[in-house]
Amino acid sequence: MHTLALMLKSYAPDFNYAQRLVESFARHNPEGLHLYCVVPVEDLDLFAPLGNRHVTVMDESPFAPHLVHEQLAGLRSGYINQEIIKLAFHELELAENYFCVDSEAVFIRDLHASDFMAPDGAPYTVMVEDNELKVEPQYFQQYWTSRETSVRLIANELGIEDSVLPTCHGHQVFSSAVLRAFVERILKTRGWDYRDALAIAPYEFSWYTLWTQVCGVIPVHPREPLVKVFHHEGQHFEYILRGITEADLARGYLAVVVNSNYSRDIAPTPVGTPKPAALAPYLSYSEAAKLIQAKLGDTWRRRVQRS
């Protein structure tokens, strides 16, 4: 059993993303950490070439007893099943701690066990309030209210009465010991499987993070997010316009995710790409024409003011 490993749940539509992730993992893995890539049985042949001595590609059949075959909590079965697999991965006894990473992630600097594990041997716990998302109108309208309600439902189930509920969106270091306690002390005492918890609130990382804070299984060592996630194109635009490069991001993060919910139909644009090239995929020809018109008008006004 590895003390620490990485775990990726993926499937055929995300193969190109997963391939890019594995390539970046190979470039930034000086300590020889291991990555487990879990995919549907029917996708195993597609993903098999990604395997090597530091990457194991495996099918999700060991988790079959836990998986669902219809919608749950208003979400399609595939989405719920990837959440279940992340929570249940500890059952394979492959790693005592595992960092769940998304297919869309790209590692931008070298990975070390010390990025994920505190000096006392306990994993770090990513804990944030996400206030920077709460104040963004686009995110608040689409996601915040329902997510906040769900996190409160989780807290209620776990007996947490605090008004402040630090949690995380993803890219958490899961402790197998914490998850074993979750199964024994939460799921089994209620006669639940993972699916029953997710039916109440389909946020696997919030279940884990809040449970970690109250179970007492490991000491809680809070960390800010290890991965920079651009949740929507406005956040991505901001970094592009500010001229923040990949090297700048690497001072604070291990990896970058450009959310595929808005970028899937265009080629992923790395942070640090020159502004015109970075903005081009997001602009229609009419928007580009309006941008040129506005730029010419601005130039003319400044010349008039100087004369």
Image: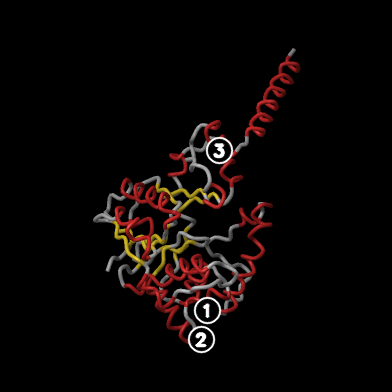
Of the pair 26 and 254, the residue shown nearer to us: 26
Answer few, some or many: residues within 10 Å of disc 1's Cα (few below 14, many 20 plus, some between 14 and 19).
some
**Callout 3 secondary element:** helix
Of the pair 120 and 182, the residue shown nearer to us: 182
Q: Which residue is mark 1?
A: 196
Say which of marks 3 and 1 sits in front.
Answer: 3
Residue 118 visible, this angle: no
Q: Residue at x 52, y 43 (%)?
A: 266
Image side of residue 91 versus residue 275, left or right: left
C-alpha distance separating marks 3 and 2? 49 Å
C-alpha distance separating marks 2 and 1? 9 Å
Q: Which residue is mark 2?
A: 190
Circle 2/circle 1 CB separation < 8 Å? yes
Answer few, some or many: residues within 10 Å of disc 2's Cα (few below 14, many 20 plus, some between 14 and 19).
few
Circle 3/circle 2 CB separation < 8 Å? no
* Quarter of the picture holding the C terminus: top right
- Could you tell which of marks 3 and 1 lies nearer the N-terminus? 1
Toward which corner of the image does residue 284 lie, by quadrant?
Answer: top right
Q: Position of residue 181 (x, y in %)?
A: 42, 79
Q: Which residue is mark 3?
A: 281
